[in-house]
C-alpha cells in the first residue's frame, strides 16, 4: 500500500514551491510528482493542505549520543571544555548512556525535520541499534584516535593503539554491511588529521576504498589543529595544511566527508572540489566553540565543491536543529563578508538537503520521481511563516522545528501530527535525564 | 481572583533555576515567590509541573508591522533592498496593512515568549490599537525622518518636514499618555542620526524630556551611517561618531534606547554607560543585513552599560524569535573574539529580560515580589531541552518557540497550552497573506 500526499506545496528547484501531489510506492520511493494524481484504492491518502512538503533534512556531521552531554561546560574555552567537561564524562559513558543519548538525539532530529544523519562516535553498535529502532536513515562510523596521551608535543601510537582502532572500525563497518538494512550504512571515521597517525589515516583511506564506504573525518576545524598539522608535517618536507595533508594520505575521494573545513585555504578548496569530496559545514558549533573566522563557503560554492550541513553534537551546538544551522550559517557568512549577497538562502537549503544526500551517496534530498521518500511536512499556517513566499528564504530565514508536523523515512511515518510513532519520548527523556545526572 | 502557579522551576539570578510557587495578584503583580504557597479559595491554580517559568522576554527594538514584508528581498545588499523592496512597499502600506502586519507580529511574539516590545514605525495609532486588543505590553513611538529626498549628498528639511514629523510624534505620544493604559507607553523616536536634522534630534530630546518618555533611536548600525555622520559633523568642528553626535544633541539620557550600537567606539561605550542609556543589541538583523563586524558587547558589559535585546523587524530578521537572538548573539560574539568566554549565556538571558525591562523603565524581567506578572511557561519535557540543567545556557543555547506553552502579561493569559486567547490567529494569517500579496 503506497501513500498519496495531496495538496501540499512542494519544494522544487532553488527553493521555489509549487502545488503538487506526491505518490510514494510500497517500498518507500517517490513514484510520481504531479499537479494532480488520481488516488488508487490501495493508497493511504494524506491531505497536506496548508502544508509545505520538503525533502527530509540531512545532518552531515553529528555525534548523536553526545546529546546526553548537552549544556555541560557552556562558555568555556574549547580545550578547557574538552579537558574538564567532555573527556571525564565520556570516560564514564557506558553502553546504556550511548543508547539513551542516541535515542534522545533521534527524538530531537525527527521533531526538527531531520531524516538522515552522519555520525561518528564510539560504541556504534548501540547507535546503530537505536537508529534502527527509530527508523531514521544514517551513516555510522567508529571514531578512531591513535594519538598518544602522554608526553610533550604530538606523538602517535599506530602499532599499539591505531591497529586496534582500525580493527574495531572494520568489524563494525562489515557488520553493518552484512545486515543489509537499507537505512543504515557504515563509514570509516578517523577522528582528525592531528589525532590520527599518518599510518592510521592511510590505512583508513584504504579500508574505506576496500569496503566502498564513506570516509568521515574532522578537518580544518580550529586554528590549533591547523598549527599542529603544519608542525607535524614540516619535518622533511613542506608543511601541509590539514586538508592537503589528508589528501596526501589518500583520504580525499568522492566518498569523503570533511567535517567543518573552516580553515581551508584557497588551494585546499580547489583540492576538495577536484577530488569530488564533500564538506560538512557546521556553523553553529564553530561559532559556539569560538573557532574564529568563517568557513570559506563562497569559495567552496564558486569551486563547485559539494557542501552539506551539520549540527555537530548537541554538546557543542547545543541543538540538532538544522533550520537554525541554515539560518546561522547564511547570515554569518553575509556579515563576515560585509556582503548580503555573499551566500543565498538556496545555497543553504541545498546543503541541508541535496548536498547532504550527495555527501552520503544516497538518492534523496529532492522531491522527484525515483528519489527516496524521506519527506517532511511543515505547517505553513504559523504566524512565523506568514506571508508565505515561494522561495528558499521563506524556509531558511523563518522556519523552525515548531513548524514541523510530520516526518517520513523511506515511506514510513516516524512522526504524524507532531506525535512520534517509533520512539517512546516520555520514557527516553526521563531515562536520559537520570543518566545525565549520573555522569555529573 | 489571583493566580497561583505551582510546581514550576523558576528562573532565579544568573539563570539558575529553583522549584517554587508563584502567586500573582488580581492586578497582575507578583505577590509572593516561595518554595510552597498555600492556595486560597480565590486562586486560579495552575499546575506547572515539568515546566520552567521565565520572565516574559522583552523585544527592545522592532517594527512589528513590517512582519507583512517578511521575506521580501532576502539576500540583497542593504540599500538595494531598501530602495527596490522596502520603500516602494512601505509607500503602499495603508492603515489596514499596518493593523494586519502588527497583529501577525503579535501572534508570533506571544508564541515565542515575548511579552513586551519597543516599536517605532508609522501609523502608530493602529499599532497601539492592535497591541491593546492583543494585551501585550509595548512602548510605541512614531518614527521621524526629515532628511530631504532630492539632491546630492545629505540634506535636511527641518522647517518643512521635521516640524510636521515632530507634531505627529507629539500628538501620538500625548494621546497614549492620556489613555493611561498601564500596558502601553509612548516614546519619541527620531529615526537615526543620519536621517534626522540636528534640529530634529535636539527637539526630540527636549520633547522626550518634557513628556518623561523613552527616546528610541537607531544608532551606529552600519558603516554607511558612521561615514555619513562623520561627514555631516566635520564642518566647523571635530567630526563626531553617531552616538557621540546624538549625545551632543542631548539625546543620551537614562530614558534613551539606542538600537544596534554595532559601531560604537570605546569612548562611545563609556558615554552610553555614563549617561545610563540603554543599547538594544540586534544581532540577527545585523548579521543578515551584513553590517559587518560585531557590536562591542564585551566592552558594553565591562563598562556596566545596560544592554537589551531586539529582533528588529521581521523584514530584516526574518523572525521575531528572541530565543534565536540570544543564541545567535552569544555565539557570534564568541567567534568574533576567538574566545568562548567572551560573553556568557547569562549575559544574553539578562539582556532579553531585565535589560529590556530596565531600558523601557518597567518593573519586569525578574520573578520577584513586586514585579509585573509578565510570565512565560516553557515545557522542559521536550527532547531538545533534555537533560535539564540549572543554568542560563540550558535556555539560551537550546530552547526555542517550540517549547513555549503559556504566556501571561500583567496577570492575564494571552496563551494557554499553545492556544492564543486574545487573537484570532487563523483569520489574521489569512488576511495578512492576502494583504502582503497586494503589496507585491
Image (cartoon, coloured by chain):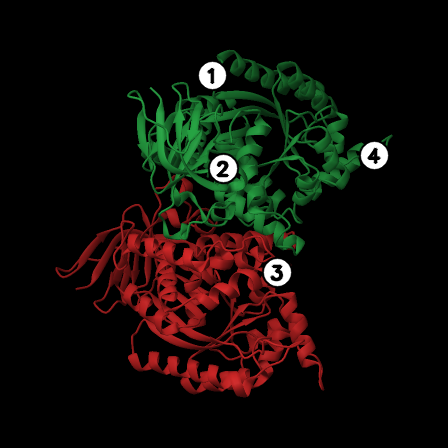
Chain colours: A red, B green
Left or right: residue A305 versus residue A434 is right
From the image, state whether disc 3 or disc 4 is nearer to you: 3
From the image, state whether disc 1 or disc 3 is nearer to you: 3
Mark 4–mark 2 Cα distance, whole angstroms, equals: 48 Å
**Image height check: is B391 above or below A265?**
above
Corner quadrant of residue A60: bottom left
Whether marks 4 and 2 lie on the same chain: yes
Mark 3–mark 4 Cα distance, whole angstroms, equals: 39 Å
Q: Residue furthest left?
A: A41
Residue drawn at (62%, 77%), measured in percent from left and top?
A244
Mark sitting on residue B234:
4
Query: Where is mark 1, residue-wise?
Result: B181
Query: Where is mark 3, residue-wise?
Result: A291
Whether marks 1 and 4 lie on the same chain: yes
**Image height check: is A117 above or below B398?**
below
Whether marks 3 and 2 lie on the same chain: no
Q: Secondary structure at mark 2?
A: loop
Q: Secondary structure at mark 3?
A: loop
Amino acid at each position: 500500500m503506497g501513500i498519496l500526499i495531496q495538496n501540499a506545496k512542494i519544494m522544487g528547484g532553488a527553493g521555489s514551491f509549487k502545488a503538487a501531489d506526491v505518490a510514494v510506492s510500497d517500498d518507500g520511493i517517490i513514484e510520481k510528482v504531479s499537479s494532480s494524481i488520481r488516488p488508487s484504492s490501495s493508497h493511504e491518502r494524506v491531505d497536506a493542505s496548508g502544508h509545505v512538503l520538503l525533502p527530509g533534512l540531512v545532518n552531515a556531521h553529528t555525534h548523536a549520543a553526545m546529546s546526553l552531554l548537552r549544556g555541560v561546560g557552556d562558555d568555556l574555552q574549547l580545550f578547557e571544555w574538552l579537558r574538564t567537561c567532555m573527556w571525564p564524562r565520556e570516560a564514564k559513558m557506558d553502553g546504556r548512556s550511548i543508547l539513551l543519548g542516541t535515542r534522545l538525539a533521534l527524538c530531537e532530529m525527527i521533531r526538527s525535520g531531520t531524516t538522515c544523519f552522519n555520525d561518528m562516535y564510539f560504541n556504534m553498535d548501540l547507535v546503530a541499534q537505536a537508529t534502527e529502532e527509530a527508523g531514521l536513515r544514517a551513516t555510522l562510523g567508529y571514531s578512531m584516535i591513535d594519538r598518544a596521551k602522554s608526553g610533550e608535543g604530538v606523538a602517535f601510537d599506530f602499532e599499539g593503539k591505531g591497529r586496534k582502532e582500525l580493527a574495531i572500525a572494520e568489524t563494525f563497518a562489515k557488520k553493518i554491511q552484512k545486515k543489509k538494512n537499507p537505512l543504515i550504512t557504515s563509514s570509516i571515521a578517523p577522528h582528525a588529521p592531528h589525532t590520527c597517525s599518518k599510518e592510521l589515516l592511510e590505512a583508513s583511506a584504504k579500508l574505506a576504498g576496500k569496503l566502498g564506504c564513506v570516509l568521515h573525518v574532522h578537518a580544518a576545524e580550529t586554528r590549533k589543529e591547523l598549527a599542529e598539522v603544519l608542525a607535524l608535517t614540516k619535518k622533511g618536507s613542506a608543511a601541509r595544511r590539514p586538508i592537503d595533508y589528508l589528501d596526501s594520505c589518500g583520504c580525499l575521494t568522492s566518498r569523503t566527508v570533511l567535517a567543518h573545513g573552516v580553515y581551508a585555504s584557497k588551494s585546499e578548496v580547489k583540492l576538495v572540489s577536484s577530488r569530488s569530496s564533500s564538506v560538512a559545514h557546521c556553523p553553529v558549533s564553530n561559532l559556539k566553540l569560538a573557532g574564529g573566522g568563517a568557513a570559506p563557503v563562497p569559495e567552496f560554492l564558486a569551486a563547485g565543491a559539494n557542501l552539506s550541513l551539520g549540527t555537530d553534537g548537541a554538546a557543542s551546538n547545543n541543538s540538532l536543529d538544522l533550520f537554525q544551522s541554515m539560518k546561522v550559517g547564511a547570515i554569518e557568512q553575509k556579515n563576515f563578508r560585509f556582503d548580503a549577497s555573499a551566500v543565498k538562502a538556496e545555497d543553504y537549503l541545498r546543503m541541508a538537503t541535496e548536498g547532504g544526500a550527495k555527501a552520503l551517496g544516497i538518492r534523496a534530498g529532492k522531491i522527484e520521481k525515483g528519489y527516496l521518500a524521506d519527506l517532511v511536512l511543515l505547517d505553513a499556517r504559523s504566524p512565523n511563516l506568514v506571508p508565505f513566499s515561494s522561495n528558499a528564504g521563506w524556509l531558511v530565514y523563518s522556519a523552525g522545528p515548531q513548524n514541523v508536523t510530520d516526518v517520513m523515512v523511506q515511506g514510513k511515518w516516524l512522526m504524524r501530527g507532531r506525535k512520534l510513532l517509533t520512539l517512546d519520548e516520555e520514557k527516553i527523556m526521563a531515562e536520559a535525564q537520570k543518566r545525565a545526572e549520573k555522569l555529573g
